[in-house]
Amino acid sequence: MAATAVQPGEAAGEVKKDRKPVSPKALARLFPRVKPYLGHIALATVCLLAASAAGLAFPAIVAVLLDTAFQHGNSRLLNEITLGLLLLFAVQASLNMVQVYLLTATAERVIAKLRTDLFAHLVHLSPGFFTDRRTGELTSRLSSDTSVLQTVLSTNLSEFTRQSIFLIGALVLLTIKQPALTGTTLAVVPLVVGAAFLFGRMLRRASTGVQDRIAEATGTADEAFAQIRMVQSFTAEAEESRKYDRHLSDVVRAAVERAKIRGVFFGALTFFGFSGVVIVLWEGGRLVLAGQLTAGALVSFLLYALYVAGAVASLASLFGAYQEAAGAARRIFELLDTTPTVVDPVSPIALPRPRRGEVGLEHVHFKYQPDLPDALDDVSLHIGPGEIVALVGPSGAGKTTIASLLPRFWDVTGGRITFDGIDVRDMPLRELRESIGVVPQEPTLFSGSIRENIAYAVAGRSVSVPDSAIESAALAANAHEFIVRLPLGYDTAVGERGVKLSGGQRQRLAIARVFLKDPALVILDEATSSLDSESERLVEEAMEELLRGRSTLIIAHRLSTVLRADRVVVLEHGRVVETGRHADLLDAEGTYAKLYRGQFRAGDRVALESL
């Protein structure tokens, strides 16, 4: 039974998740990724507890120093206390070193795995998802948002634990020593906590705005870099710079607004915290003057009070950082929760071998968005094993849409498509796509060597490709001759998107890649429209060899391609309006005859008419 057709409106991309307020659950979802490192975290926690305990012992030792060593002039005790403090701080430093290393290393591994998972998830999403998202935005999520989470795991988490220990430990010791002064110290806590919640929410919204604007700016830059030749050919460098500057101005405005909130926030925390210390100092001083408290005890109490004030201020600050991290986590997991519209069936049917490459479109309907007209309207088409079929029609007729539906980059919204007699929605995506090779009009190469680009044909099979197979594919594609003339031969770097090679060279590498893949069906988007005559001849010869014995669907732009086809299918407004051989369609004086006279090159027509 075929899989359920995608509902209208879902074909263009992935299922969108509604944006929800930041929830603690967003950060809690990191726990499964942290779980494998709980042993490291436990050891880091023990080190942190011990180091914090050493810190809490310092004010008590200072009290002894003031009340005993100084008051009685005991130099020996002074030396012993000083030496003890040095040893104490040496131990504390060692513990902090171990703790920082363990947490930082753990954070690096967790975030690296998160980035890997996010990237792996994104590359498995259907092409429609990427029509609604800018590349720069996605790379920003991979880099800046994950960096925010990395800071939380490596720094903020340990600082939160440390300040919590200082707060609780100092309060306990204060209560034991001077309950009356403890009440004065705690009076400032509600003010600090209230400020943290008030400004924390504002910081979260402001930080989310900054990150979103950074993503927009990154998207603009990425787009300009990707189309640098187009930018420079129209001398639009200044315009692109202005666009980027406008986005950066938005970033700066949002960041300045966030800075204002942070400034007021930290100013309020500083005032409330140290005002409490001043009041404690005033009240404690009165007790010292009354003889109810020693000077050493007062200094010790003040230090503990500073611990409390510092801890409350730090925890309030960390609450703001938590809000920023929660927003980043929400954006990341929003992407991870995005589900593809094109998925493997629950009970897949394996393709029989050998694969024949027989294709059938049965009353196919398709639309990209629910509010758009049908891109395909009741299209039926058959490609027999080894048959070459050319798709012809004006721009927007639906030719590229059919070529995209065959490997299930989208799913039909009505009807069905079969491959070797099996509904494509019932077979594993990997098997279907391994059976189809695409030679695009604009070939896509990756930065790397020529060898790596040809071998990319079998990258999904996780197998090593012998050099002989790569060279055989290059020979068949008429590419070997120009490759061996390059300084490093097959190890020559092609540059980003293959910019170091000519159009004809890139096209022959794309054909070599399909030769190595050895598919049952080839989808050929006319590949010679922008080449010089010699490159065109070499590419035509390579394609002639490639198509021999394979089922082929050609998106035809040129007469030479049409003449190669066994059958021509004419599309108009998403419907099949004519089918037949070239000569028969010319005699019919229909849509094809008009396209032939109006769109195909005059030289091609003369060549045909001379036959």
Image (cartoon, rainbow, N blue to C red):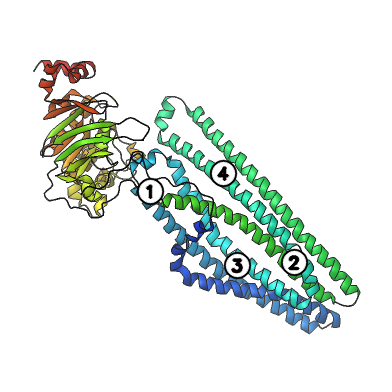
Asked whether disc 2 touches disc 4, contact meaning CB atoms under 8 Å apart, the reply is: no
| Circle 3: residue type | Thr
Q: Residue furthest left?
A: 611
Mark 4 or 3, nearer chain start:
3
Q: Quadrant of residue 290?
A: bottom right
Density class for disc 3 (Cα within 10 Å; few <14, some 14-19, many ≥20) is some
Mark 1 or 4, nearer chain start:
1
Between the C-alphas of marks 2 and 3, the distance is 20 Å
Q: Which mark is residue 439?
A: none
Residue depicted at x 34% and y 49%: 124
Q: Nearer the viewer, mark 2 or mark 3?
A: 2
Residue depicted at x 77% and y 73%: 300
Residue that badge 4 annotates = 209
Residue 339 as seen in the image, left or right of residue 507: right
Say if residue 38 shows up in the picture: yes
| Circle 1: residue type | Leu
The image position of residue 226, as x and y in percent, is: 40, 36
Q: Secondary structure at mark 3?
A: helix
| Circle 4: residue type | Gly
Between the C-alphas of marks 2 and 4, the distance is 35 Å
Residue that badge 1 annotates = 122
Residue that badge 3 annotates = 161
Residue depicted at x 38% and y 38%: 131
Viewer-side residue, 164 vs 334:
334
